[in-house]
């Protein structure tokens, strides 16, 4: 906390992030891309979608696709628990939910405490990464939400738009 105050005092820019965990790792995404963090809801599965797309949820009348980041990152699948959260973010102008093991809090990291990702990154594609944030002794993997999906995967989600359109029932 003192480190954050010092950074502000010297005019350093602070990046605000939502922190969350997957497996034993701590991640962060820019708060500017996050609309909200919710508890996991019942997911309706859709046929012929990539394995990491778990299906869709109804969030106050909006049908939102849910991406399981464990699956996307090639990690072992686990059952969702009461700690599981969905981070609803804006991806190419559309809301998308990302299932994570748990979401912690809003954190502030000084720009000078963010370093580029290492050249050799195991498991995660380097293109997903924005950098590594240093928060005291803790390291936080900072994700670039816009790059989590490939162009082909984004097209798959766009195709889901047709399924997502609400149908009026009289």
Image (cartoon, helix red, strand yellow):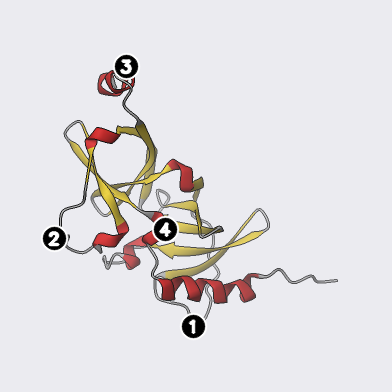
The residue identified by callout 2 is 120
Q: Earlier in the sequence, mark 3 or mark 1?
A: 3
Q: Is residue 157 above or below residue 39?
A: below
Horizontal side, residue 82 vs residue 6: left or right: right
Counting other residues with Cα less than 10 Å from the Cα at mark 2, is it few (<14), some (14-19), or many (20 or more)?
few
Horizontal side, residue 120 vs residue 168: left or right: left
Counting other residues with Cα less than 10 Å from the Cα at mark 1, is it few (<14), some (14-19), or many (20 or more)?
few
Q: Residue at x 63, y 76 (%)?
A: 162
Badge 1 element: loop
User: How far apart are labels 4 and 3 at the CA level?
Assistant: 31 Å
Q: Earlier in the sequence, mark 1 or mark 4?
A: 1
Badge 3 element: helix
Q: Earlier in the sequence, mark 2 or mark 3?
A: 3
Mark 1 or mark 4, whichever is nearer to me: 4
Quarter in which the N terminus is drawn: top left
Image disc number at residue 146: 4
Quarter in which the C terminus is drawn: bottom right
User: How far apart are labels 2 and 3 at the CA level?
Assistant: 35 Å
User: How far apart are labels 4 and 2 at the CA level?
Assistant: 21 Å
Q: Residue at x 79, y 70 (%)?
A: 168
The residue identified by callout 3 is 9
Q: Earlier in the sequence, mark 4 or mark 3?
A: 3
Counting other residues with Cα less than 10 Å from the Cα at mark 4, is it few (<14), some (14-19), or many (20 or more)?
some
Residue closest to the eye, 22 or 18: 18
Mark 3 or mark 1, whichever is nearer to me: 3
Q: Earlier in the sequence, mark 4 or mark 2?
A: 2
Percent coordinates x, y for residue 165 in the rendering: 68, 70
Image disc number at residue 48: 1
């Amino acid at each position: 906390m003192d480190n954050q105050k010092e950074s502000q005092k010297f005019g350093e820019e602070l990046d605000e992030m939502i922190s969350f965990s997957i497996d034993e790792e701590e991640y962060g995404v820019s708060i500017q891309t996050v609309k909200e963090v919710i508890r996991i809801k019942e997911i309706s599965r859709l046929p012929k979608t990539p394995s990491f797309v778990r299906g869709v949820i109804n969030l106050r009348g909006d049908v939102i696709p849910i991406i399981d980041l464990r699956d996307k990152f090639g990690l072992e699948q686990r059952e969702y628990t009461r700690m599981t959260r969905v981070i609803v973010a804006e991806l190419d102008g559309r809301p998308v939910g990302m299932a994570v093991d748990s979401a912690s809090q809003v954190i502030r990291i000084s720009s000078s405490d963010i370093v580029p990702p290492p050249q050799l990154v195991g498991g995660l594609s380097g293109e997903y990464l924005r950098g590594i944030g240093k928060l005291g002794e803790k390291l936080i993997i900072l994700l670039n939400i816009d790059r989590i999906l490939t162009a082909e995967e984004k097209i798959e989600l766009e195709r889901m738009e047709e399924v997502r359109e609400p149908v009026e029932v009289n």
